[in-house]
Image (cartoon, rainbow, N blue to C red):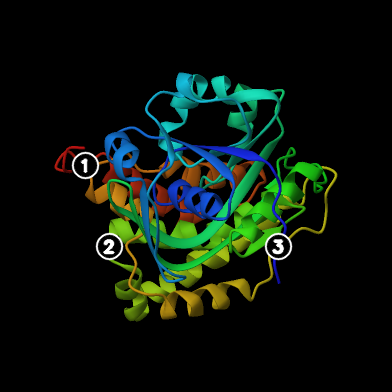
Amino acid sequence: MTVQRSSLTYAVIGTGAIGGYYGACLQRAGCTVHFLLHRDYAQVQAHGLRVESIAGDFALPQVNAYAHVADMPPVDVVIIGLKTTQNALLKTLLPPLLGPQTVVLTLQNGLNIEAEIAAIAPQSPIFGGLCFICSNKVGPGHIRHLDYGAIALGAYVPEDQPGGVPPQLSAIAADFKAAGIETEVVEDLYMTRWRKLVWNIPFNSLSVVLNATTQEMMADPNVRQLAQDLMTEVVAAAAACGNRGQVQGRSLPPEIVSQMLDHTATMKPYRTSMKIDYDEGRPLEVEAILGNPLRSAQAAGLATPRIDTLYRLVKACDRQPHRPSP
């Protein structure tokens, strides 16, 4: 069945493994997409984007590539594909792209991400996208999509307020579906972020601490048990944080732990995004993925000793002086 796409225009800030992949899919489906690049600009300007994907390889020989945000036009949707460790750049990068009707869609990992962006763009609706995908950037303008690919889209509201689905979000979802991306529209973005953290907290973090791929972690019964215990703690934290304010009865299903473990066991060997950042000497998303959930759980009165220990270990890894230089 053919899905009708909208006439929305897009800008991608952070054309890497995530922003580059989804932006390329949108352009392939006929959307107008503008890509902001840094080190990859010359390569992409000359040769476009190349995507190797389990869903089928494709190339975009010509894309709208920019080295400077001042050269980009205002758009209907700004997609943020940067790591949260680069969010200080958004004060400069985001405002030039914003028109009266522009919405911002962040594809970043972690918790409490949207509030920081809303402070920069107070007049723009803020949406979040949770990407359930294994994807790496393997070279300039070259993305390798290894597994999965679904995305969950939701509108940002304060965590203690009821959610909803604005018309702009439905239009964006239609574009993603027309691009061949499995897309879910959620009314509760906050709890959907917690759902993603059930996987991200143990596996992103342990991959750094243990210097291991997903396959290596799942092959060790001790590590698998630790991941399971961490996941169970994240599920408890989600319930404690979700049941505050005007919204009650929020929780993640307990079977999510076994489901995610089973999926990880069958996943192709994957070096997580945090492990890649560590190996390449880049700052780790410690606060977004570990620190913010830990502090939220503490504020809700719940002790999370395993997450606290992992947070301290990853922070120590992030500060190791022998790490390779960026």
Q: Amino acid at mark 3?
A: Val
Q: Quadrant of residue 223?
A: bottom left
- Pointers 2 and 1 in contact (C-beta within 8 Å): no
> What is the secondary structure assignment of the residue under circle 1?
loop
Mark 3 highlights which residue?
3
272, above or below 157, in the image = below
Q: Amino acid at mark 1?
A: Gln
Q: Is residue 63 visible?
A: yes
Query: Is 151 placed left or right of 289 in the picture?
Result: right
Could you tell me residue 192's position as x and y percent?
65, 56
Query: Is 49 placed left or right of 124 in the picture?
Result: left
Of badges 2 and 3, the one in the foreground is: 3
Q: Is residue 241 visible?
A: no
Say few, some or many: other residues with alpha carbon within 10 Å of mark 2 (under 14 / 14 to 19 / 20 or more): few
Mark 2 highlights which residue?
210
- Pointers 2 and 3 in contact (C-beta within 8 Å): no
Could you tell me residue 51's position as x and y percent?
38, 58
Q: Nearer the viewer, residue 17 or 202?
A: 17
- Distance from the alpha carbon under mark 2 to that under mark 1: 14 Å
265, above or below 232, in the image = below
Mark 1 highlights which residue?
320
> What is the secondary structure assignment of the residue under circle 2?
loop
Which labelled disc corresponds to residue 193?
none
> What is the secondary structure assignment of the residue under circle 3?
loop
Residue at 56% x, 67% y is 232
Q: Amino acid at mark 2?
A: Leu
Residue at 45% x, 25% y is 88
Q: Quadrant of the N terminus?
A: bottom right
Could you tell me residue 150's position as x and y percent?
57, 63
Say few, some or many: other residues with alpha carbon within 10 Å of mark 3 (under 14 / 14 to 19 / 20 or more): few
